[in-house]
Image (cartoon, helix red, strand yellow):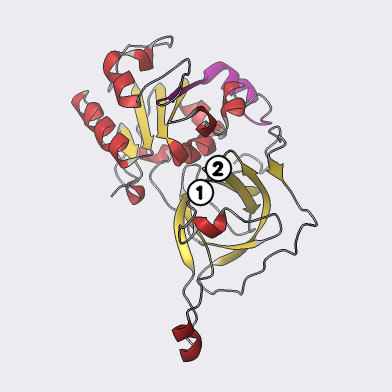
Amino acid sequence: MAPRLPICLPFPQEFSRLTDTRAPVLIPDNAAFQTVTVKWVRHWNDRLFSFAVDRPASFRFRSGEFVMIGLPGIETAEQAASGRPAKPVMRAYSIASPSWSEEIEFLSIKVEDGPLTGRLQRIEPGDQLYMGKKPTGTLVCDALLGGKRLWLLSTGTGLAPFLSLTRDPEVYQRFEQVIVVHGVRQVSDLAYHEELSAKLAEDPLIGEEAAAQLRYLPTVTREPFPTAGRITDMIADGRLFAGGEGPAQFDPETDRVMLCGSTAMIRETAGLLEAAGLDEGSNANPGRYVIERAFVD
């Protein structure tokens, strides 16, 4: 097993660390969840932010898995009168850091009136959150058969599990090529664009492998950008394969695919993969493509 080392990516000005702006927000213990402390927060724009928490010593996960994250529920007058505490508000979040990291990183949307993200987007370093004790998921190498090209197709915050996988040495050992495709509406939604464009050159464990094996293809649908269009359209017209090595279509013998993002993208892309001869896999029965069904309606 690779040593657990801190991620050494560049930290831009958008990062916030411990400050004196306010006292940290502490939360009561809950037997069902772990209490973790926020290490840093990075706001990409008015719709997206990333944050990381300290990794509990007992917490183990496979790159690509997800875990529950949340905050205490807001107590109503009726609950206060009855003495019944409000239940924590929890949501499933893909882990963006690799399995060896000393911190647990997440990528989240901002929903102003969202039950969780309306509050979560205001966290600061030093605040406490709840985190589940048992990560799980199918966007892991174990759920795929061996192959040569690994396609990581994502939209929006669906990029998160692929950030975990692209920083894991096992991925580069198992696949000759790793192609990350990130589809968004606006250019500012391209979270981690600089890091991925540089092919994770500053990463202490996979910098050399990523430089040789990683290909990053961002695409934007609602603003001018060198690559424009929906992922499914790029598959259909062949642009997804242009400039890369290998066949200009999905090959069931050599291609393996992971999908994470909008329900519409996943369903449409899964149909294209099935038509190309790729079958869906799982932890119990590895296949040629996988989706995270916990995030699909």
Q: Amino acid at mark 2?
A: Asp
Asked whether 42 falls inside the magenta stretch, the response is no
Quadrant, the N terminus: top right
The answer to whether marks 1 and 2 mark residues whose Cβ atoms lie closer than 8 Å is: yes
Residue 26 versus residue 248 in the image, above or below: below
Q: Position of residue 131 (x, y in %)?
A: 54, 61
Q: Position of residue 233 (x, y in %)?
A: 30, 21
Tell me what residue is drawn at x 36 percent, y 30 percent. Answer: 257
Q: Amino acid at mark 1?
A: Lys
Residue 126 versus residue 106 in the image, above or below: below
Q: Give the extent of the magenta segment.
A: 203-221
Tell me what residue is drawn at x 53 percent, y 39 percent. Answer: 164
Identify residue for label 2. 46
Comparing 232 with 61, the one in front is 232
Is residue 101 visible in the rendered image? The answer is no
Identify residue for label 1. 110
Residue 44 versus residue 74 in the image, above or below: above
State left or right for residue 86 relative to residue 9: left
At numbered mark 2, what does the secondary structure look like: helix, strand or loop?
A: loop
